[in-house]
Image (cartoon, rainbow, N blue to C red):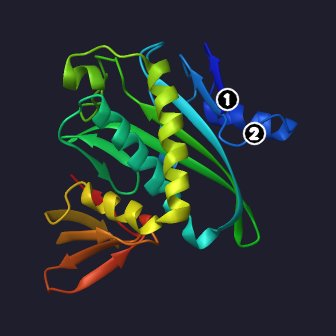
Amino acid sequence: MKLIKLDAIDSTNIYVKELIAKGDIKNYTAIISKYQTSGRGRNNNIWLDEPSKNLNFTLYKEFNTFKIENKFLLNIISSISVFNLLKKYNLKNHSIKWPNDIMSGNKKISGILIENNIRGKLINYSVMGIGINVNQLNFKNLPKATSLHIETGVTNSPELMAEELQQILKLNFELMQENPDKLLDDYNKFLFEKDKTVNYLTNNKILLGRLIKVNKLGEILIRNNDGVIEKFNVDEIKLIY
C-alpha cells in the first residue's frame, strides 16, 4: 500500500481525484497532508484545521462488483476503523454518531466524507476522506469539537496514525467480504445515544423518540411516542443533541 505525504493541499479528497483523472493511483493508496486549506465535511461543512496538528487523510478504494444498494457499508467500515484507531490511542467514552461522525462524550473528534464513483448499479471506486482532531487545543466558535490531546493529555503523531488507519481500513474491507453483519453489529454496538430518548427534527417538527439502531441500508430506526418504530434516511431527519 502506498502512503503519499504532503505538507499542504487544498483538500486530500481533491488531490486523490486529480490522481484518478491522471490514471496515477492504485487500490488502497492513501494521502495525508499536514494542512488543508479547503477541507470539507458532509453537507459542504468546512473542516477547520490548524497546520500540523491534525490528521487529514484520504483513502482510494477500488471495487469490482460492489452494489450501490450496499453503499452504507462504506460508512460503517470507515466509522469502525476510526473508532478502533482511537481506542488504540486510549480514547475513552467514544462512540459513532450516525451516519459517520466519531464522538468523544458529546463532542465531535472526527468526521468522514465519502465520495463514490457510480457506474450503473455498481460503485466503481470510493474516495474516503477522514479528518481526526489529534493535537489541536483550540476550536474557535466550535464548542462541540474536541481532540485526542484534549481528551487524553497526550501528543500523538498524525503521520503514524495515518499508517495505522490505512492498515485498519484494509483489514475491515477484507472483513466486509467475509462477514459484513459483524461490521454492522459493531457499528450499532458503539452507536451514539443508542437505546436513549432523543430529540429529532423531521417534516419541520421536533419530536421525541428512542433510538433503536441503524439497519444495513443506513436508515435509523426510532420508536416514537406511540410505540411505533419509524425508519429515516439521512435526508429525512436531523438528530438534535
Helix, strand or loop for disc 1: loop
Q: What is the secondary structure assignment of the residue under circle 2?
A: loop
Vertically, is 202 above or below 23? Answer: below
Residue 2's disc is 1
Between residue 88 and residue 135, name the one nearer to us: 88
Residue 136 is tagged as: none
Say which residue appears at 55% left-offset and 54% top-offset. 174
Q: Is residue 107 visible?
A: yes
The residue under label 2 is 26
Q: Residue at x 49, y 50 (%)?
A: 172
Q: Tell me the distance, in whole angstroms, between the alpha carbons under discs 2 and 1.
A: 8 Å
Q: Earlier in the sequence, mark 2 or mark 1?
A: 1
Residue 173 appears at what percent x and percent y?
54, 53
Of 209 and 156, which appears nearest the observer? 156
Q: Is residue 26 left or right of residue 187?
A: right
Q: Is the Cβ of the residue at disc 2 closer than 8 Å to that at disc 1?
A: yes
**Furthest residue toward right:** 22
Measured as percent of width and height from the top left, residue 175 is found at 49, 57
Residue 208 seen in this snapshot = no
Say few, some or many: other residues with alpha carbon within 10 Å of mark 2 (under 14 / 14 to 19 / 20 or more): some
Query: In terms of depth relative to the viewer, which is nearer, 39 or 202?
Result: 39
The kind of residue on which mark 2 rests is: Lys
Horizontal side of 61 relative to 209 (left or right) equals right
Looking at the image, residue 74 lies above or below residue 135: below
User: Where the N terminus falls, by quadrant?
Assistant: top right
